[in-house]
Image (tube, rainbow, N blue to C red):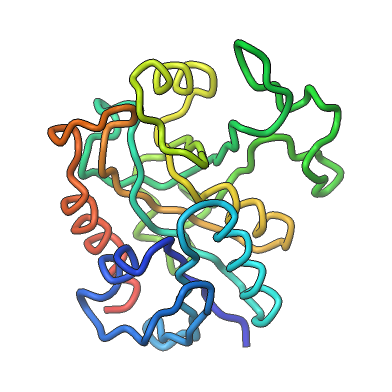
Amino acid sequence: MKTILFVTATVKEMKAALGGVCILPALKQAVAVPFDFRGKSGLLLVTGIGIINSAFALGQALAKYEIELVVLAGVAGTFDPERFSVGSACVVKTEIWPEYGLKTEKKVDPKGLGFSLAEVDSKPIWDRVDLCSGSALKKSVLDRFEKLPEAVSLTVSGVTATAEEALRLKTEFGADIENMEGFAIAYGCTLSGIPVCQVRTVSNLVGSRDRKDWDLQGALVELGRICSPLVK
């Protein structure tokens, strides 16, 4: 039987997303555990933070189970607090890996090396992949995410900590939010032919370490509000 795989980077995010309305099984990094989504077979997976952990954990799960749908949930930083304010939720339509390619003084050219990451349906993947969002979610168990605002997301290995770098990334890639796992999960699912949806709640302003620009607890509460209907 094919299953839904629900993924977060951390145990804290998993507990925030689903633990407020049900009892969660014991969670261990990189180990998918059985879970029931309103009568539908499912799995919970905590990957660990970052693209390396996420790629490894997803690969382990896909090798062991038949997955029909992957949902990635977690917190993120915002490049655009007017459209994606701290504490708000969004669904990711495109995930970009801004670190792949030929790096010059001014930018990273994903085609600069001459090698794409892969080809799917004869189309090269350079530095970005599209995810399920908007009307594509309407007839799935994720229909409650359909009306969330759609965001372009960057996956980074190091959190952006300066306003100057935040402005560069926003300008160069047209990015709305920043996270540390999205591209790894979306890319792996794309190569495997598995639909993937990513929902994020905003915990902070990208580029700022000032406490006034952060509300992690508020983002976790919002994560539970949007994700809990999957199980209750």
Q: Residue at x 61, y 32 (%)?
A: 99
Q: Is residue 162 above or below residue 23?
A: above
Q: Is residue 33 left or right of residue 101?
A: left
Question: Which corner quadrant of the image does residue 58 belong to?
Answer: bottom right
Q: Nearer the viewer, residue 16 or 158?
A: 158
Instruction: Looking at this view, name the residue that lies furthest to the top.
Output: 106
Residue 195 pos. (x, y %): 60, 60
Residue 91 pos. (x, y %): 41, 47
Q: Dividing the image into 4 quarters, which one contains the N terminus?
A: bottom right
Q: How many marks?
A: 0
Residue 158 pos. (x, y %): 47, 39
Question: Which corner quadrant of the image does residue 225 belong to?
Answer: bottom left
Residue 7 pos. (x, y %): 46, 66
Q: Nearer the viewer, residue 115 or 225?
A: 115
Q: Dividing the image into 4 quarters, which one contains the C terminus?
A: bottom left
Q: Nearer the viewer, residue 102 or 136?
A: 102
Q: Is residue 157 left or right of residue 67?
A: left
Q: Residue at x 65, y 22 (%)?
A: 108
Instruction: Looking at this view, name the residue that lies furthest to the left.
Output: 212
Q: Is residue 124 above or below residue 148?
A: above
Q: Residue at x 56, y 52 (%)?
A: 51
Q: Is residue 90 above or below residue 205?
A: below
Q: Residue at x 33, y 34 (%)?
A: 78
Q: Is residue 12 left or right of residue 212?
A: right
